[in-house]
Amino acid sequence: MSSSSDQQYPPYGESSYGGPSYEQQAYGHQAYGYQEPEPEPGVAQTWQGQTWDTNYQPSVQEQQQAAAQAQPPAHPQAQPPVSYPLPPEMPYDTPTTMLRPVAPEPAPAVAEVPEYGAPTTLGNARMTAAQRARAEGRSPIIEPGVQPAALTALLGVLLAAGAALSPYGLLVPLVLLQAVTAAGWFRLNGMWPARQGIALAFAGGVTADIALLAAGEEHAPVAILGTLGVWVLLVLVLQLRSHAGADERQYGLMATVASSALAVVAAGYLAAAPDAVVVGALAAAAAVLVRALPLPGAVSLLGGLLAAAGAGAAAGGPVGAGPLGGALLGLGAGVCALVGHRVASYDYPSRFVHMTAGVALPLAVAAPAVYLLGRVLV
């Protein structure tokens, strides 16, 4: 492509206004990747390249050049792999099948049990006898001991002496027995103070005594059972009128009925024959004394029964019951006395329980046996 001599074009790279051309502004002097040669002065310039003319068809050589330029550059030479130093190996123990010895753990220190002391209201931290027995794993049964047994023996002797004198002579130790029985039973059941219940049970025993003295020996069962029935009904009515809770009323009802029954049953000494009362009271006293001795359990129990039979045989000869009858009566009274002694030992009782229930229950429980066996053997 050429131009006429009268039409001049500005040099390549400069605009018609004297400034740099658009290609030079955008790509500098290296447009399309090659360096333009400097134009010769006075020579018309020609330009070849891509065009937007739709009638222009590039030649085969131009197409090959364009395809060669369009190929992607060759990949750079692969870099060799970089190696990093490995961490140092950790030392390990040699495998073995032997177990390593382990030092035993020290045994926990066992707290020392403080010595037993008298009950106090000053906040003393010493353990009671019940707490000590529970901590040491011993039996919850704590027997009354020698002192209550001695008092039981003394009360039995008084009953025997009073029966030998007259029914009214028997009435004094009997009333004392009924009073101690009523108080001891309530305390044995954990109900204290219970003055109303104790007074009601004691009143039932005294009422039975009065009924027996009035009715005589031939009507003794009716007097005892009648008094017991009336007293149970009276206790039930009084407990229904109580404003306490249901559980407390139930406990009070059971304790009052049982205490009243024991006090009324103890009146059986008045209904029994005087000779039977002498034998039975002495046999019960002997059984409790031997049971309180510091002997093994089985030996103490067997010794108490033998002592009761021996005392009954010894007392039965002079009073007309005979040695055999006295021994059988004494053995029956001794069994009942040991049952009462066992009941008074139940569930960590206190010293007050031992000095009341522990004293009275052996003699009170033995009263029915004295009455029944006395009617048969004496």
Image (cartoon, grey):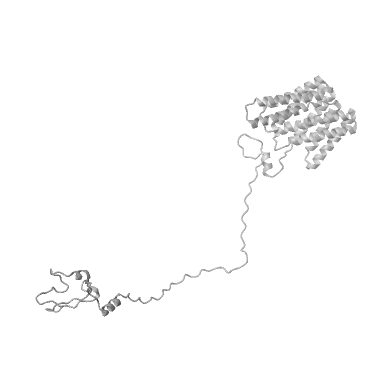
- What percent of the width, then of the height, locates residue 17? 13, 68
Which of the 4 image quarters holds residue 10? bottom left
Note whether residue 341 is visible: yes
Instruction: Work out which quarter of the rendered image holds the C terminus and state it.
Output: top right
166 or 268: nearer the eye? Answer: 268
Q: Classify 28 as above or below 170.
A: below
Give the quarter of the figure containing the N terminus: bottom left
Foreground pick, 230 / 330: 230
In the displayed orientation, state which residue is furthest to the front: 55
Observer-nearest of 353 and 119:
353
Q: Quadrant of residue 245?
A: top right
Q: Picture quarter containing residue 243?
A: top right
Can you give x and y, in whole percent of width and height, for residue 284 in the image? 81, 33
> Residue 219 at x, y = what percent?
82, 22
**Does residue 166 appear in this view?**
no
Residue at x-position 78% and y-position 28%: 265
What residue is at 21 percent from the left and 69 percent from the top? 26
Left or right of 135 on screen, residue 316:
right
Extreme residue in the left direction? 6
Q: How many marks?
A: 0
